[in-house]
Amino acid sequence: MPFHVNGRVLINGRGRAGMAVSNGETVVRTHGGGRYRLDVDPIRHRFVFVVLPDGAAPVGSFYRPVASLPGSGVGVDFELDRADQRKRRNFMFAQFTDIHAVVETGWASSTGILGKDVRKALSEWEPAFVVATGDLTKHGDLTSLKAYRRLMRAAPCPVFNMFAAHDGQKEHRARKSVAEGCTRNYESILGPTYYSFDWGGRHFVVFANEDHMFTPPEAEAKAHWLWNDLKAHKGRPTVLLVHAPPSHGFLDTIVDTDVDSVFFGHWHSSKAYSYRGIQVFGTPPFAFGGIDKSPRSYRRVRIQQGRLTSELLPIRSRQSNPALPAPGHRFGAVKKTPLRLLWSRHLDTKLHRAAPVVCNEKILLALSDEDGKGRQGVLCLSLETGQQQWRRRTDSSVKNAVAISTSSQNLTENSGDLAVAVSVTGRLSAFDTRSGQSLWTTDLHGHPDRWIYTSPVVIDNVVYVGAKAGYGAYNLADGEPLWYYEPSSLRVLQNRVSLLDGKPLWYHEPTDTRSDYLPCYASPVVIQDTIVLFVQRTGMIGLERASGRELWRREMDFEYMYPQPVAFDGGVLSCGDRGELVKLDPKTGQILWRRQISEHKFSEHKYLCGYKPVSSEALAGLGANRNDVFVITPSGDCRAYSPTCSRLKWHFELGRELLDTTPYRRGFRSGTVGPVVLGKFIVIGAGDGHLYLVDRRTGMLKDRWWFGSPISAVPCVEGERLIVTSFDGLLACFDLVKG
């Protein structure tokens, strides 16, 4: 039954007017003597809490559970102390997300390991506080939540926690109806699932946005609280902290508020972009490698002179050896080395997994920017010297290779070929390769909610592009859509309205067909008139190139580690979660043969996503030529097989990853890209920071170069030239020494 509470907010024992107090739905201000009054409904409200102001910190707790209040008229006071550091207008804070803490040994997210990482990450600088944006534990059980609380005591500063689905997973699995909430374990250990506070002239909103974990009345109260809180703090620049990615529909609703930046996690990927003046930052997990092959990371956010900037900081899987040479040098004494370094340069941005492309003596690179500094786009360099020819900015990072059209019939006679790039948000752009002039841009369906990690394909003046949520064909001349295909298995966005007044409430549905929940990271293969899509958690789909009509669908066990399929001997060579190689007929989808390649079970690194344990056996890299099939296995070696994969020819072992880029793993030994053929050699770009040149016939090492950062994109072979990029932006051009 509803009741009301009275109370005071005191700072150093004196009542303070103007302080904000909330029941999790309405927000009131204290008046004379720091007094306030709130109506409380136990069905809708879980806590009464004070919004911590600049220059004050709580004595004890800043909240009171509603269940602990005896009834109407009870006094709920909040005692605060002065904290001058909270007044500083120039400060830094850290965002951790998707920690997935467990108490079991052997997991990549075990608390014993993570505690050391927390101390190490924060010891190198002085954050004012840490925000942990959800999925703090793996299971959401009381033992894990208590262990997480102990874990974060390693932080040398205050920690502001947020609830997300994994933190209520134990309750969610046991829930029999939507009338039961999934937040009780979390609340008993860590307090409110959403709240706000002030620091250094800014307002921070910690908002758990996965509605399905709350009862309907609680979810509705939570939505009303957000708007009431923003209204109550109007005039303050505001940072919104959520777990699930905000849709563009939701961002539209906050454009006219004081929110200038949004930080989220959930998708275990990195994404930074700007939407109608709001900076939006998606951060990879703190515990292990991201599903987009981004290294486990956290964000350092700086507030200086009122301006907010962000920096994504990867966590190294091990200390660098100080005895190693500088990046770009040959490692070790290898006689008769076949590779000669022609030139190298270090770019000012990350290169992620986008392979370099060569066109008319030019190198085209897709640029990634995880910090929101405007460095993303397409870069054109001279193949001969590495000098910049032109650079063009895109709306967000381009995390896939640029596509080239050598047909100029749709251009002016003085122009060059076309380069086509698609950003991670789903904006498609065409550039003149000679001048860099932007020719046109068009947005894919669902922009900017898309997560595009696949490369576009250009054939016969048509651009084919997209990912899991949908794939389309666009006219190369002007970007006009020709057809668009959406897998029928995906659900449509569900609308939500208020139970009180019928007004719409925003609602994030992760299976919206306009988004790429969970995105696909393997680019398609085009064979004659068929486009073969590799769709995460679905399998392989064949589309008619002319119309986009689905021709066939093959269900397979695909998850996160898969490489791009390869056109091979008239078929499509692909891999699945069970360590298999599979060859399919592109016209019918029929499996021609399948071979078990890897038996590695990851016994020391348990699977963390919570779906199918077979995913831990997926292959990591794939390449082929007419006579050989090359794979990178989860156990960290490159293997050469006969064309039917019936015979192992040789294997070559790789070192441990410098950064944890293998999905859901850490401290791992693997590569993330397939090998390529260079003459009589195999080129292997490895996560251990080395470029390996291996004899194609014997598997013997012939040359090795140190890059100092994971080689996370497939090297480019152009004649006898080899162009290699590293994750941190090192670009090097080699050729083969004669003889």
Image: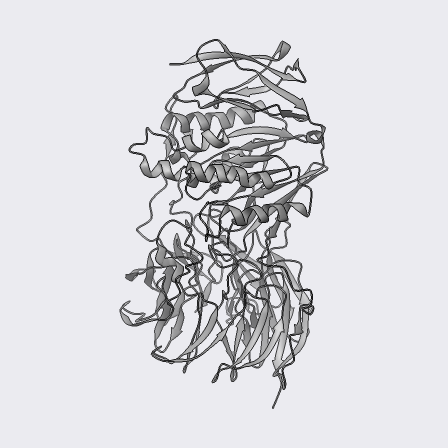
Q: Nearer the viewer, residue 258 or 519?
A: 519
The residue drawn where x is 49% and y is 40% is 147
Q: Splitting the image into 4 quarters, where does residue 496 fall?
A: top left
The residue drawn where x is 32% and y is 34% is 175
Q: Is residue 390 above or below residue 227?
A: below
State how many labels appear: 0
Q: Is residue 602 left or right of residue 11?
A: left
Q: Nearer the viewer, residue 440 or 466?
A: 466
Q: Is residue 598 above or below residue 107?
A: below
Q: Quadrant of the C terminus?
A: bottom right
Q: Is residue 26 left or right of residue 472?
A: right
Q: Nearer the viewer, residue 321 or 597?
A: 321
Where residue 411 sits: x, y (%)? Answer: 54, 66
The residue drawn where x is 54% and y is 76% is 717
Q: Is residue 418 visible?
A: yes
Q: Is residue 364 above or below residue 395?
A: below
Where residue 88 sits: x, y (%)? Answer: 72, 32
Q: Is residue 283 visible?
A: no
- The type of colouring in the image is one colour
Q: Quadrant of the N terminus?
A: top left
Where residue 26 sits: x, y (%)? Answer: 49, 20
The residue drawn where x is 38% and y is 21% is 43
Q: Is residue 58 above or below residue 278?
A: above
Where residue 222 sits: x, y (%)? Answer: 45, 27
